[in-house]
Amino acid sequence: MKCVAFKNSKIKTMNKKIFVSVALLISAFSFAQGTQAAKRPDNWFNLDPTNDKVNGVSTERTYKELLKDKKSTTVIVGVLDSGVDYTHEDLKDVMWTNPGEIPGNGIDDDKNGYIDDIHGWNFIGGKDGQNVEKDNLEAVRIYRAYKPKYEGKTEKDLSTKQEKKELELYNAVKADYEKQKQENEMSVNQYKFILDGYDVVMKALKEQGIEKLDAASLKKYEPKDQAGKQAKFYIAQMLNNYSAEALPEIMEEISGAVEHFESMVKYSLNPDYDPRSIVGDDYSNSTEHIYGNADCKGPFSFHGTHVAGIIAASRGNGIGMDGIANDVKILSVRCVPNGDERDKDIANAIRYAVDNGAKILNMSFGKKYSWDKKVVDDAVKYAQSKGVLLIHAAGNDSKDIDVETHYPCKKFENSKKSATNFIDIGA
């Protein structure tokens, strides 16, 4: 990493404890996870609190006691996510395979509108094989769409209830967007400040012939300028909480945080960034179903593969982990980018999975705003009519989703009714 001097006077004058606490917060989480993981049995999450003294979900006990000698019927589970690595050694034998499609012949053999959909479909890819990897937050997309019409306007300038409703939404997403942009830019600066301080110290020590950073060697370092003095202070504080051997890994965690927040600023919170042209659909047409490509793995399938593994990684094969469910086939529908998913894609993903025999849909995603809730509601109703259960994540933000809506949601728009096939799950 290059040593970059911060020129922002606000960053220079902020309380030094802020920077230390930011670094310690992320590193403490990482190292706590690592320490706990070292003590866990490999299959801990499938174990039983009573029998095994481990806070798992009692999968193994269930198979031994409740399901012993019972026969099962194969269930297709649709994983609506970032994509699933269907070549993964622990998933390849549990992937759904379309019986009506011949792989790689470029023909829609089963005439369902999707060419070569062998293990699923990708609604955020183009016919030319390109894929959307990063996308905006929904707030930013709404902000971009409404800004030309409502920027600088008040209710007095508008005549219809619909326009006034849209103005209210615009003002909300604008405030949200500006707040998040400021917070993420500040986070980038804070984390970079720590990384740069570490680099300053390490470079100075090496110039003195000292290769190893510890409390004793740090005392020998005599900074020549204010940046060096600040850097020495930060690293000294970290060495009070962690061993010298731990610092490189902590810096890796902080570097990952920088990458995350920079991506948020550059893509998720950038109104000038819009990758939808890659898909090539008519985005204004919510009823359009046939678009995308057959790459249901995509360029960044870590999250979807992780989720699929928890559900159904091959059990008892001695490879990696054992999934929760036996006799399951995973159908992958790629519809969630690094950013907020789009309602049109989620609606089509639900319909595609249902039409191809999925009886349970796993939806580990969500967002604060919904651009076209009706199209999602209609898809949820369609799944409900086919007896398909939708499992949706309650989110990672500790929000009370009975008060603050986390989309998609079970309550139908402009109705007192809710879906009966929709369950929100919190960790």
Image (cartoon, rainbow, N blue to C red):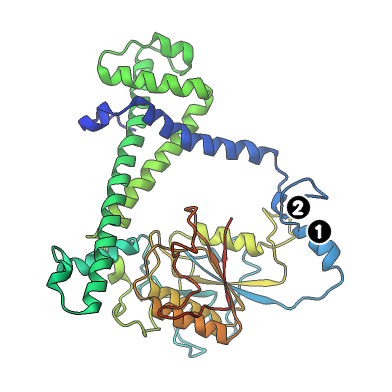
211 up-or-down from 149: above or below: above
Give the residue number, with chain letter if any, for mark 2: 47
**In the rendered image, is residue 101 in sight?**
no
Kind of residue at disc 1? Arg
Residue at 26% x, 67% y is 168
Which element carries disc 2, helix, strand or loop? Answer: loop
Image position, residue 54 (x, y; %): 75, 46
298 up-or-down from 74: above or below: above
Kind of residue at disc 2? Leu
Residue at 30% x, 18% y is 228
Q: Is 312 placed left or right of 179 in the picture?
A: right
Residue at 24% x, 62% y is 171
- Packing grade of label 2 (10 A; few <14, some 14-19, many >=20) is many
**Quarter location, residue 173:** bottom left
Outermost front residue: 156
Give the residue number, with chain letter if any, for mark 1: 61
Taking depth in this image into account, of 385 and 341 the one nearest to the observer is: 385
Which element carries disc 1, helix, strand or loop? Answer: helix
- Packing grade of label 1 (10 A; few <14, some 14-19, many >=20) is some
Q: Marks 2 and 1: CB-CB under 8 Å?
A: yes
55 up-or-down from 138: above or below: above
In the rendered view of the protein, which quadrant contains the C terminus?
bottom right
Image position, residue 85 (x, y; %): 54, 63
Give the CA distance from mark 2 to mark 1: 7 Å
Image position, residue 301 (x, y; %): 49, 60
Residue at 21% x, 30% y is 9
**In the rendered image, is residue 92 in sight?**
yes
Taking depth in this image into account, of 301 and 346 the one nearest to the observer is: 346
Outermost bottom residue: 111
